[in-house]
Image (spheres, grey):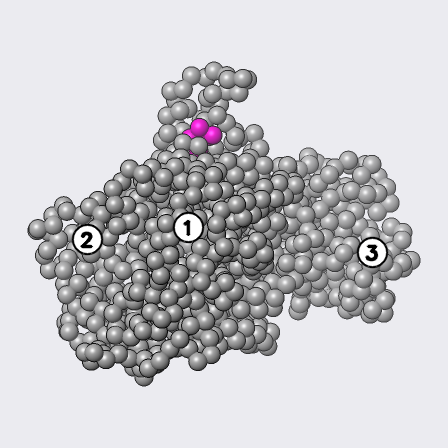
Amino acid sequence: MLHLVIPNPSSLPVGIRALPTMDECVGPSLKTVGMIQLEVSSGLRSCYSEYFPLRRLQCTLVARTINVKKMKFFSSADTHSTWRIGAGAFRFILPSANLNPPSVLGAMNLVSTKVPGSGLCRATTPDLRTYYKTPALWSDPPSPGFYSSTMSDTDIKHELKSDGGEKAIDEVQVLAAVADFDDPNMDKDAAIAGILEDDSPYPEVRSAVANTDDPDIPVSTIRSWTLGLIWAIVVPGLNQFFFFRYPSVTVTGIVAQLLSFPLGTAWAKFMPNVKIFGVPLNPGPFSIKEHVLVTIMATVGYQSAYATDIVAVQRVYYNQIYNFGYQWMVVMSTQLIGFSIGGIARRFLVQPPSMIWPLNLVTCALFNTLHSQSYAGVGTRGGISRERFFLYAFIGSAVWYLFPGYIFTALSYFSWVCWIAPDNVPLNQMFGYVHGLGMSLITFDWAQIAYVVSPLATPWWAEANVTAGFVIFFWILTPILYYTNAWDSKFMPISSRGSFDNTGHAYNVTRILNPDATFNQEEYSAYSPLFLSTTFAVSYGLSFASITATLTHAFLYFRKQIWTQARRAMHEQPDIHARLMARYRQVPEWWYMIIFLSMFAFGVISIEVWETKFPVQWFILALVIAFVYVIPIGMIQAITNQQVGLNVITELIIGYALPGRPVAMMMFKTWGYITMAQALQFTSDFKLGHYMKIPPRTMFTAQVIAAVIAGTAQLGVQAWMFTNIPNMCDPAQKDGFICPSTEVFGTASIIWGVIGPARQFSHGQVYYALTFFFLIGFICPVISYVLTRKFPNSWFRYINFPVIFSGTGLIPPQAPLTTNGTIGANNIQTWWGNSVYANTADAKGTPMLKAAKGDFFGPRTWA
């Protein structure tokens, strides 16, 4: 239904005529005095349903305004979508997107406004007649207040454009129709172009995602399920095998995406067209929707399940070898319980058009490239196809990577300043890439550039926030702390991922453990407190700040969006993709509830039946933390392509709550952090299916089954490896299966679970000052919010403190690979281009100071 709120009916523009009205106050006060309100409903459901029995009417709203000063969008309990337009002449059009002429334009009533605060007053009798340029085009309404037209949608749009309406709409603040917050991704002019074409208001979405859908395209076929399940076994299994090796190899999702295309095409060409139980074995050409489903099944669990590290650490560090039932329930619970939370979050993170998920747009573009049948020219001018262009780029990038990856590795760690003075420690600390701050700026290795996330898939303003955070905290604050010797940092490298004792050597955690892997206080007091490099300490502080900044930012910026989406159905979304997806049956809530309850039961059984020293109430708290943060973090990730991690805060909480319980620490961290991460993986995949128009129930089923198969395959591979590979996880293992990730995970379990954060961050301890970052993270979004409200059109609107704090979360960086295998070990790997960067103070991690022999730095006593 469409309503017009007009403060002064006598001032209606030409073409709109109002009759006397009777006022009836209904609903809450919308404070519309002095404004014109245009309310658009998505269908004819009530008094007009007997004329057109429709459940959904898809419409395009095009408004022309003159001298508009303000336009604001909001929703209330009895409205679906509301536009406020300043005083002036206007024209409105509601062409139907799914009906043949005569097009249904909607039902209209005049709404007048009483004194502010008295409520929304609606006319009780039909009182508004609307005329287009040619009144003859209109027929008499079938009932009072209802109008139909013989004009087609094309005619209406053409008439509007020829009359200058498209230009006039520039003054409409279309941002209000898309998000209930000031979205930095929104460009007004580009959004207008999208709305005029009934497409996404975001140009990056329009360029990668089609605004049409054919529901008859095959999706859930024998072909897609066969290929998907094969990938769900092969890719996770291979990755789990190489996960324990150093150097490791990871088969990413793009491998499955690329290889699935020729496999599916070959299936369509050579497989006989027979039916199995009535289902065709070869339904025809390999469709893009089948391709999407196969890729999602391949990628949903392609990385090593986080919980498999719990199993490995229990075996290697704590001599706890439990049966396969325990391992399977822990892995399934940690992997799938996030899916149920993600199902709840989908209305906030998938359906709104402002949740663009930038990384998914890259995947969509590749799908469209592989399945495109059009050339790349303009008009009659020819050009290469998208497939050929992709092939050229693929071959070129593969050939180029041989240079920074093998032939001339100094191109990757291009610390050219350090080569000039390799023994100058301060210079190497500033300009080095291995243990330095990277001020050399240049690299020719895309793997270095995209180490955290591809900048091509990240909005420019989000990258600007990350860059600002990096410069402030690592190029300004870190040198100040280091060269003033805060935390005795001069005795360690300025940047290192390791931990140190009070002599500057790597911290030997085995010295402070009893034979049963419990904490030995006497040995700890006789050995050393734990020290961190300056960048590592700063990164902990930034992690603390990001946790509080995320909640503050979400409350200030997203609270209206969250409240609106909590009450909005999919077909009511102001987005073509949501309206197209509304035709498919949605996943019922009880499906998610079954997943949650069953996986919750698996979690309780695994921690209660087997000895874990992990109370159930802390398991519940871990899930609560994940549930609270999934929507704020998800909204930030969907907009900026940056994810705030919960790993540090979960370690901190359980370390204080249950000190001396390393297994409990690992479990709390996994259920608190990975549950959130899996929920966002689920919603990200669902957004991909949303863009590519995959039926939601098919998506859900494929994701859950693929996740179960992937986790089971990984556990099977891991069990086989520990049984059949000699000296597994031994530093001297001959084939390189030294388990580097297991070592890091196990060390973290000792540092946080055995030593505990109380000996590092409590009052009087070395890193107590870092806890003030919690307060900094809470305050900073308030400052940016106030500045944005005061200066709405300034650059302050682009400031995002959760991104500033978390965007540099992987600093200090991973140590470089110092080996490329044995091929060319005595020739090409020894030449200057592969060794110059390794012969510097940066690569060696040389500190500014060294403790005198027999002496140590730091406090004289500790406990």
Residue 500, given in percent of the width and then of the height, sits at 30, 69
Question: In whole angstroms, how far apart are the C-alphas of marks 1 and 3?
Answer: 65 Å
Q: Residues within 10 Å of mark 3 (few under 14, many from 20)?
A: many
Tag 1: Cα neighbours inside 10 Å, few (<14), some, or many (≥20)? many
Furthest residue in direction left, as rendered:
827
Q: Is mark 2 on a helix, strand or loop?
A: loop
Residue at figure coordinates x 20%, y 76% from the top left = 425
Instruction: Identify the disc placed on residue 310.
Output: 1
Residue 227 drawn in magenta? yes
Which label sits on residue 819? 2
**Element under label 1?**
helix
Q: Which of 494 and 119 is in front in this view?
A: 494
Q: For the residues carrying marks 1 and 2, which lies nearer the camera in this image?
A: 1
Q: On the rendered image, what quadrant is the C terminus found in? A: bottom left
Q: How many marks?
A: 3
Residue numbers of the magenta segment: 224-228
Which of discs 3 and 2 lies nearer the camera? The answer is 2
**Who's the residue at 9% across and 57% down the image?**
831
Q: What type of secondary structure mainly makes up the magenta span? A: helix
| Residue at (55% x, 39% y) in the render | 700
Of residues 837 and 318, the one drawn nearer to the viewer in this rendering: 318
Say what amino acid the circle numbered 1 marks: Ile
Marks 1 and 3 close (CB-CB < 8 Å): no
Q: Residue 110 carries which label?
A: 3
In terms of sequence position, does the residue under pointer 1 or pointer 3 come before the other?
A: 3
- Residue type (three-letter) at the residue carrying disc 3: Leu
